[in-house]
Amino acid sequence: MIRKVSLLAVLSAALLAPMAATTPSTAATKTPGTAAGKASRQSMDVSITSITPDVPTSQTTQIKIAGVVRNDTGEAMTSLRVQLRYQAQKFPDRATMSAYQTDQNTATLPSQVSTRVSFMDIPALEAGASKTFELLATPVQLGLPSFGVYPIAVDVARFNVPLVSQRTYLTYAPPTPQKLPRNRLAIALPIIDQTHRAENDNFVDDKLGAQLTGKGRLAELAGIAATAHKSVTWFVDPALLDDVQALSRKHRLKGKDQAADPNAAQWLNSLRTALASSPVVATPYADPDVAALAHQGLDGQTATAIAMGGQVATELLKRDVSLTTNWPVAGVLDPDALDLLNVSKVDRVLLNSTNLPPQPPVAFTPDAVTTLDSVEGPVTALVADAELTRTFEPDSTAPGSIFLSKQRFIAETAMIAAEPGQTNPRSLVIAPSRRWDPNPKLVNSLLKTANRLPWLTLTKLDSLKPSKASVPRAALTYTDQDRKDELSAKYLAPLKKVAEKAQLTALIAAEPKTHSDFDAAVLRLASSSWRNNTRAGRAATKLVDGAVQTQMNKISITGAAPDQLRQLAGSNGQVPISVKNSIGETIALYIDVKSNNPGVLQIDPTPSKKLLTIFNDQNGGVQVPMSATTSGDATVSVQLMTRNGLPYGKPVKLTIRTTGYTGIALVIVGAALAVMLAAVVTRVLRRRSQRRLARAAKSRESETV
């Protein structure tokens, strides 16, 4: 009875096998980074790790497909077969090829299964065990007729029922009747990070140091730069270099003193060496959110960021850098941001394909270079290819993901070269996301592969120019979501106030400066890296605001305490106003004094028009003429002003106590004058009487004689 049941099971499996091969089933189709691919690791797992050669070039070229089968079912498995699925019909276009890679339906797997070649039986595989495999075939055995990209897959079957499969591509490149165009490929790789400082020596987190050594993201980027093809263009944020430089010295972490990090100096030296002979573009300092700045009235910050970025990058990399190419956040901008960049001397922008789609749509891969109109003239736009870019940053870290990305890259570029009707070489651009976490093995593999493919020529980004292959494109497409992603008006409002205050510390100097010591700190607050962490950005803004205010407070009006009164003796006189300068340099300012009680106290404005120069650690001031109509207390507002008429700090209120004559005092003085006058008159009359008596006596004496 048991034997009959076993025989029935085998017969049932055999009968169901053809149906299972052609209809959707419970077999898992692996696609890196997908839920099904991850779930499959809980059952059977298959990974292709290599195809040799990458690109077969003749009908008889032997193709070796290698990989690993792993049993994650939790129990031993028997009667397994690893087999190659293929199809002699090549992909008609890139869209079909992309759909094949992401499709999870087993019915869309290549329909032909190798039965004479390209299979390997595994009699038994214990739970948790792995087994390597090699499948051999030639293009003629697979029926590949001509140049193109063909779908293949490797699956693991049991009793002819597929359990799991892995899809990939096979690019076949025999000689073609017409020579394929050799497309120009420019690769832009970013070295950009999260902002780590608020004030110039105060770090807001301790994450930077760990990234600079071992398997840290920035350490691996420096390693990639050291071996990358010299045509690769590197976009470097000077603020990151500045952060690393600050970390290499004594610094503060959230206000607490910290020792210098020796790894920081080592990383900076290694990057400097790695980039010595490669094209380098300096992003605006701290990679600011240019679109948000344009929309919130902070236009001047962009030009400042570009200028400072050039200075810092040149100083720390010890070489010239380009400043005229801009890579906006997420590769998208609108006309306002484009105009703002253009007036800041930017004449090339690197954009996402969604930001500048072809118009009308085309059935082929458009040339990456086009021209945009801007406020000061044409701007060259370089549009990154989304699918090619995706190969540099796959979603999965599963075994075989490097191989699959390389096969995808080969297939994509071959498909572009063979697109019907495209006989002129086109420009292509790859640009991974700015804060990508690269896999060094993958990136190095792709760069080496790109350099040896016969239908590609690696070139520098700045060498790409508009050509006959360029296609019309729509206007800049900036969506509502793009606008929502910007740093908000609520976030930027305090930043704007801090920027204005910081600028005052430069304008108050005796030798006026165009930039303040806080410019770098303010630009770090405008960094696009705060888009996903505005709470931390607001905290950093408060720290910078506090530092700016502390600096401003080093210039102060003396004797401004509420209990300190200024005396005005009499109805008019001069009251001294003094300013203390402890800011560290000579300053020049005006002192503007206004009466808050003009009916009681009036101010002569003449001293307010005098530019006052005060040396460091010195006091300086003016004598302000005032006149009072009555005695008592009155207040005046004293405002320090920069030489160009901007208020420096808040006005200070001073109390003036006047001691002018009152009505009673006038009566007393009048009475005293009357008494004095009466005494004088009496004395005069007395003297006159005495003179008359003397003359009368003298007259009598004369008569007697």
Image (tube, rainbow, N blue to C red):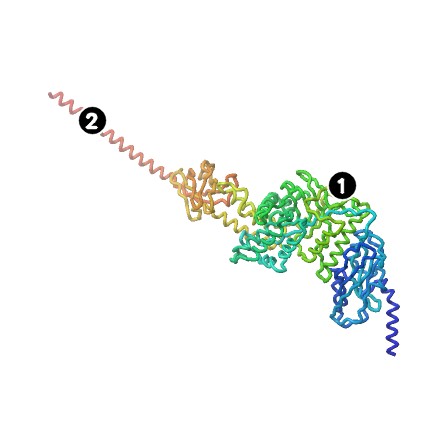
Residue 457 visible in the picture: yes
Residue that label 1 marks: 468
Up-down: is 95 above or below 34?
above
Relative placement, left or right, of 425 versus 239 is right
- Which of the marked residues, 1 or 2, is nearer the chain's N terminus? 1
Residue 393 falls in image quadrant: bottom right
Say above or below: 203 vs 13: above
Q: Mark 2 highlights which residue? A: 691
Image-based side of 512 in relation to 670, left or right? right
Residue 284: percent from the left, percent from the top? 61, 47
Residue appearing at x 87%, y 65% in the figure: 18
Q: Residue at image x 75%, y 54%?
A: 409
Which residue in the rendered view is the most extreme toward the front?
A: 60
Q: Any mark on residue 394, and which?
A: none
Determine the residue positioned at 86% across, 66% down. 17
Pointers 1 and 2 in contact (C-beta within 8 Å):
no
Sort mark 1 into few (<14), some (14-19) or many (20+) by Cα contacts within 10 Å. Answer: few
Which element type, helix, strand or loop, lies under badge 1? loop
Q: Report the front residue among 138 and 228.
A: 138
| Image spot of residue 160 (x, y percent) | 84, 67
- How far apart in space, not on screen, are marks 1 and 2 (Cα)? 128 Å
Quadrant position of the C terminus in the picture: top left
Neighbourhood count class around disc 2 (C-alpha, 10 Å): few under 14, some 14–19, many 20 upward: few
Q: Secondary structure at mark 2?
A: helix
- Is residue 26 among the parts visible in the rendering? no
Q: Position of residue 336 (x, y in %)?
A: 66, 43
Number of marks: 2
Q: Nearer the viewer, residue 416 or 524?
A: 416
> Does 567 appear above or below 120?
above
